[in-house]
Image (spheres, rainbow, N blue to C red):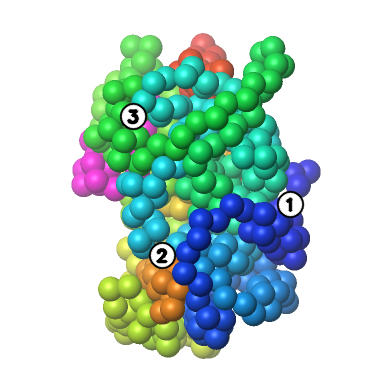
């Protein structure tokens, strides 16, 4: 069995250890009375607005998480120290759409002018490896295992980050992916752990087992953005959100969806499946790795070409209310859920009956009845996981790669106002609508699990090799011989 994420009381112990030991640059302290006011707004916004707050973590456990954090607000703190206190509480909800963010000024400084850790990293099997380096003069330090930074063991750093990183349920891939491949490590090292430039880094060479110590200055975000496309052109994302291509004379179609948005909309899927029919493709590889989601209706539209009977996509879409008391603190204005979109049920909650995926949906033509192979990883989230769950429930695909990121039975997202706490300016994103998919047969605490698990190694990533796609092509070619 796959292990569960630790309980919230343990999460707090880990996160506070990182907080107390972190090296935080001096900052203005905020009176505890003002922070207590912010904490009350923070807690009430989540409890009032988040309609799935107890989906994975029972209310008594969430109450303990809130209470434990609230008791720490007894002395002046900087805004970053307060953010570090709130982060593991939000993570304890186990909702990947919920987030707590440092004040906007800190976010902008980290994105542009503040010198951060000069590497992108990959997190794999509890270890951290350097994947890309951004120093002005390349040091050839990629592929090394990071063992410590400024005297802090990497195990402690990684535990603290994981404990404070939101993700749906107990998916074992989403938090390491967001920290590593998703690019959060350099920012979290400063904002969450409090480790600043210069960086005294202890490395281990995985090949030889030898150690190495290096002292490096941080790199500004604007410099990183300038050098990345020059040094790593292969990493640059294509302009298109989706594309289709063919291999082996057309017998294998590869449909890559990077985002359910932009060029993946309109008639893209209609045209793609016309091409697939025209090429008489027998196998379809759907690559939704690193696809964080997008428009719900586009996930449903793709599914409609892969089923041949009318189907139900959602069982329910639930909101706690139409109006919220925290609206005055919402960035850009709170707004009200239009009455025409929802109806109030006997459960005293509101149900979205105008969503384009609500009700019985019809299959689309041309229908594809051949083999489907779905590629996924810890970056496959939200709308992407809705599609994957439906494919899994209908036994319509073979799943290759790693566990996906989103909950098997749905998520909480939709409208997601950002509440800015008035005194600290720390922000919390509160998703309002909880989605319940019309599926069965999955693990309620996990995401979609692979039928064929393939994890790229750090050597694969550095070389640009793709063992997940290689396995999919192997299976497609094997099926075409029969």
**Cβ atoms at labels 1 and 3 below 8 Å apart:** no
Query: What residue is shown with label 3?
Result: 228
Residue range (magenta): 253-271
Extreme-right residue of the structure? 1
In what element is the residue under mark 2? loop
Query: Which numbered disc flags the more N-terminal residue, 2 or 1?
Result: 1
As drawn, is 94 to the left or to the right of 264? right
Say which of marks 2 and 1 sits in front. 2
Image quadrant holding the N terminus, namely top right
| Rendered position, 70 above or below 399 | below
Indicate which disc residue 160 carries: none
- Circle 1: element type: loop
Residue at point 38% right, 71% down?
Answer: 417
Local SS, label 3: helix
Mark 1 or 3, closer to the camera: 3
The circle drawn on residue 4 is 1
Task: Identify the mark nearer the N-term, 1 or 3.
Answer: 1
What residue is shown at x 64% (from left), y 21% (from top)? 212
Q: Is residue 123 above or below residue 457?
A: below
At label 1, counting other C-alpha atoms closer than 10 Å, the crowd grade (few under 14, some 14-19, many 20 or more) is few
Can I make out residue 175 in this image?
A: yes
Question: In the figure, is residue 335 to the left or right of 309?
Answer: left
Above-or-below relation of 460 to 361: above
Q: Residue 113: image x %, image y %?
A: 34, 47
Q: Residue at x 70, y 46 (%)?
A: 156
Judge whether residue 327 is colored magenta.
Answer: no
């Amino acid at each position: 069995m796959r292990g569960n994420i630790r309980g919230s009381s343990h999460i707090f112990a880990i996160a506070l250890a990182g907080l107390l030991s972190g090296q935080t640059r001096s900052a203005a302290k905020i009176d505890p009375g003002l922070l207590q006011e912010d904490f009350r707004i923070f807690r009430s916004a989540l409890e009032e607005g988040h309609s799935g707050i107890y989906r994975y973590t029972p209310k008594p456990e969430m109450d303990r998480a809130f209470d434990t954090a609230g008791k720490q607000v007894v002395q002046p703190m900087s805004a970053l120290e307060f953010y570090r206190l709130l982060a593991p509480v939000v993570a304890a909800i186990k909702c990947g759409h919920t987030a707590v963010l440092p004040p906007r000024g800190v976010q902008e400084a980290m994105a542009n002018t503040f010198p951060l850790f000069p590497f992108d990293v990959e997190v794999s099997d509890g270890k951290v490896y350097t994947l890309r380096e951004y120093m002005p003069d390349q040091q050839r330090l990629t592929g090394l295992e990071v063992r410590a930074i400024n005297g802090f063991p990497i195990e402690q750093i990684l535990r603290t980050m994981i404990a404070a990183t939101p993700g749906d349920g107990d998916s074992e891939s989403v938090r390491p992916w967001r920290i590593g491949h998703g690019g959060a490590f350099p920012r979290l090292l400063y904002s969450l752990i409090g480790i600043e430039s210069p960086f005294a880094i202890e490395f281990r060479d995985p090949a030889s087992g030898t150690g190495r110590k290096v002292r490096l200055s941080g790199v500004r975000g604007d410099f990183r953005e300038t050098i990345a496309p020059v040094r790593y052109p292969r990493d640059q994302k294509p302009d298109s959100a989706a594309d289709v291509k063919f291999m082996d004379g057309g017998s294998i179609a590869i449909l890559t969806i990077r985002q359910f948005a932009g060029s993946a909309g309109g008639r893209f899927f209609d045209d793609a499946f016309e091409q697939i029919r025209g090429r008489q493709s027998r196998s379809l590889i759907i690559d939704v790795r690193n696809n964080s989601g997008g428009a719900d209706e586009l996930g449903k539209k793709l599914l409609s070409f892969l089923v041949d009977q009318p189907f139900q996509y959602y069982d329910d879409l639930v909101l706690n209310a139409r109006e919220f008391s925290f609206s005055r603190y919402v960035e850009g204005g709170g707004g009200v859920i239009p009455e025409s979109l929802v109806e109030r049920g006997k459960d005293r909650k509101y149900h979205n009956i105008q969503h384009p995926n609500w009700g019985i949906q019809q299959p689309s033509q041309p229908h594809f009845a051949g083999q489907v192979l779905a590629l996924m990883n810890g970056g496959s989230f939200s709308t992407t996981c809705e599609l994957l769950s439906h494919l899994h429930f209908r036994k319509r695909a073979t799943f290759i790669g790693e566990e996906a990121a989103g909950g098997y039975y749905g998520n909480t997202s939709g409208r997601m106002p950002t509440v800015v706490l008035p005194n600290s300016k720390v922000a919390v994103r509160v998703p309002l609508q909880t989605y319940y998919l019309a599926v069965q047969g999955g693990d309620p605490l996990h995401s979609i699990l692979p039928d064929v698990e393939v994890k790229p190694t750090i050597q694969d990533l550095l070389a640009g090799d793709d063992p997940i796609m290689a396995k999919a092509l192997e299976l497609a070619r094997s099926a075409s011989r029969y």
